[in-house]
Amino acid sequence: MSDNYSGRTIVITGGTSGIGLATTKRFLSAGANVAICGRDETRLKNALSGIKREFGEEHLLGVACDVLNKKQVSDFADAVVDRFGGVDTLVNNAGQARLSTFENTDEEAWREEFELKFFSIIHPSKIFQSHLKKSGSGAIVCVSSLLSRQPEPRLVATSAVRAGQLNLIHSMAAELAPAIRINSILIGVIISGQWHQRFESAKNAGNDFDSWVKKQAIEKGIPLGRFGQPEEAANAIFFLGTPMSSYTTGSTIDLSGGYSRHVG
Ligand code: NDP
């Protein structure tokens, strides 16, 4: 199957950093149109100028938008359709993890976590749904986590809410078929902006970033012996977000380097 997707339009929430940014480049390198969003204007501007240097600006659109704000998502959708005429793939990627235990997650934190993990999928999926339906090969890809099947002690709220999110995606897959397919990638650890921030706040490690990351991978016991790269996640998103995966919906791809211990 050809790797040329010129004329296909991809929307990537949180496309200004990490996995979203690598996915933007992956689709642009296949000739697709890509629209990205993020909340921080400076991060958006910097990401856009870097991408333009590599790929030009003909197939690129960037809009500041918080996926938790319905009006902003709706304005983002209007801007995408004005510019590219429709939408074929939506990548629900925006978000971050919350480091917390059951003991220290307060009620407000629980609500914030529910809101982020659910509405970062619900708002964009509902708002882009009519355009995806018209595509003829509409696809939604959700960037999720291995935590949805394998909770971690220091990520209690994120793990619980990720499990609910996966359940929601399963329901959506049945309801949106056959017009729109929806699948997820389940990440163990991928090096991204989040991990650079965690490194900054763990300065006592006294290492450079690469050595710190290597040590973390060994301590975690990841069978492939390392964290993943954003480009490895982007390849899986590319597969699920194009007709290459035309007979797959309600499914997941594991990107955990073998760290997954659950069966089924
Ligand atoms: P990064 O921090 O590098 O990127 C996150 C992106 O999301 C940024 O562009 C950020 O921009 C954007 N974003 C965050 N919140 C919002 C929001 N409310 N509205 C719009 N944009 C938003 O992290 P990753 O690449 O690691 O994260 C991508 C996804 O992968 C996240 O959902 C994360 O939870 C998930 N994931 C990542 C793992 C990993 O190991 N890297 C593990 C498991 C899951 P801005 O802040 O400017 O809005």
Image (cartoon, helix red, strand yellow):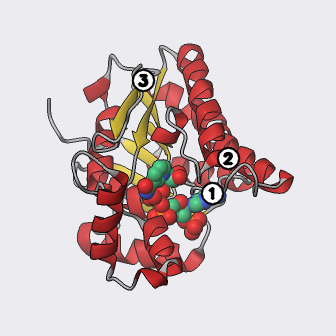
Identify residue for label 3.
Answer: 251
Residue 187 lies, with reference to residue 200, above or below; the image says: above
Q: Nearer the viewer, residue 191 or 18?
A: 191
Tell me how many marks there are: 3
Identify residue for label 2.
Answer: 157
Callout 3–callout 1 Cβ contact below 8 Å: no
Residue 51: % across, % down: 33, 70
- Residue 49 tag number: none
Residue 239: % across, % down: 29, 35
Look at 47% across and 14% down and name the residue there: 178
Residue mark closest to the camera, 2 vs 3: 2
Is residue 16 visible to us here?
no
N-term mark: 3 or 1: 1
Identify residue for label 1.
Answer: 98
Q: Nearer the viewer, residue 29 or 261?
A: 261
Look at 21% across and 48% down and name the residue there: 224
Between the C-alphas of marks 3 and 1, the distance is 25 Å
Identify the amino acid type marked 2: Ala
Is residue 210 visible to us here?
yes
> Could you tell me which secondary element the residue under label 3 belongs to?
loop
